[in-house]
Amino acid sequence: MAELKQYIFFDFEMLCSDKGMTFESMEAIRIGAVKYDLKTEKVSTFDQYIKPTSTKPLSLFCKNLTGIEDKQLVNANDFKTVFEDFLTWVGGIKKSRFFSWSPSDLNRLRIDAAEHAIPNSTITKIEKRYVDFQEIFTKRVSRTNASVESALQLYGLQFIGEKHNPMYDSYNTLRIYLNFLHTPVESDLLMLKHFIFEEEPYSVARINLQLKDKLICDLSSLIDHHDIFQMKEARKLLKRTRNLVKKYNNILINRSGLFDKENVLLVEKLVVFYHDFLQIFEEHDTCSSKVLILDDYIVKPVMQLQLKRG
């Protein structure tokens, strides 16, 4: 694979209506993008209107939402021509990584490319190098889907440029990504607030002590001094355990290096318990068992945490 030399952040504005439209019919009417050179850190931009195949006038709702008028689309090029211009501007798919804020932009690209007979091999190359950054940000920082504007605000930043302009949406998504990439401590502290502590105050100086207390409390509450469960009860416990894995998984990743070995080990125990439990549950469920019995080696580490908690 070619050496990665640049990031491409892109965004589409699409046909829309407050009276309902299928996603397939929401053709792209504008594409904006920014290119970030990894060596020079130079940012360049791309912005073009796209003439849709639909000849219907834009709805008032769509005009107000996107800021786009029919007159801006009349003399615009079709999707195929604009996409060719976009690829020329990119200057090489294989040396690029592509990002957008939510998968809808990649889905839009797939649909419109197929409609305009763009080779599937070209789209496949982009797909292989594509990142849904909103999904990453949700998993690593915000827990719930955030808008570009609210994600910026988490880092103390304001949206730059015209809202609903896809080039500025792309540029601001790049800003979020660079903050996420280059400030792992700040990102992990934001993660702690959204995933673990929520409204509970915490001190950076005592972060590992407070985190350990939360972990032990959550882990020790999983098994209530017994290892025999009705399957309905076991299913609920499995769900609770899965949610805890999601809650604490970023501690295991430890991008910032903030979290000490003891807390990382506690999360490792949680993950091991979950996978062992899941395997046993699926075996029992396949056999239509009414009762699930957890082996001692599975529950013992969790039981020990209960004793440690006192």
Image (cartoon, rainbow, N blue to C red):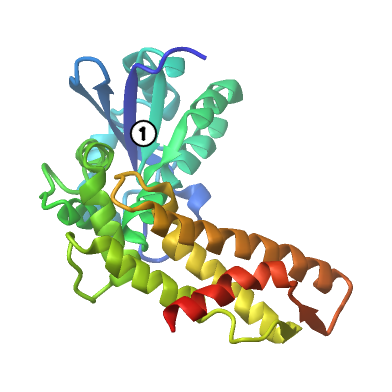
**Left or right relative to 252: residue 227:** right
Quadrant of the image occupied by residue 114 = top right
> Where is 132 relative to 246, above or below?
above
Residue 42 position by quadrant: top left
- The answer to whether 39 is drawn above or below residue 138 in the figure is above
Give percent across and percent down for residue 197.
29, 71
Q: Position of residue 245 (x, y in %)?
A: 51, 63
Q: Amino acid at mark 1?
A: Lys
In this rendered view, identify the residue nearer to me: 50 or 226. 226
Q: Position of residue 242 (x, y in %)?
A: 56, 67
Q: Is residue 172 above or below residue 48?
A: below
Label 1 element class:
loop
Is residue 234 shown to the viewer in this render? Answer: yes
Residue at image coords 71%, 85%: 232
Relative horizontal placement of residue 175, taking residue 99 as reference (left or right): left
What residue is shown at x 33% (from left), y 27% (from top)?
Answer: 8
Decide if residue 91 is on the left or right side of residue 220: left
Residue 240 in view in this figure? no
Q: How many tags in the picture? A: 1
Q: Residue at x 11, y 53 (%)?
A: 156
Q: Which residue is mark 1?
A: 51
Whole-percent x and y of residue 14? Answer: 36, 46
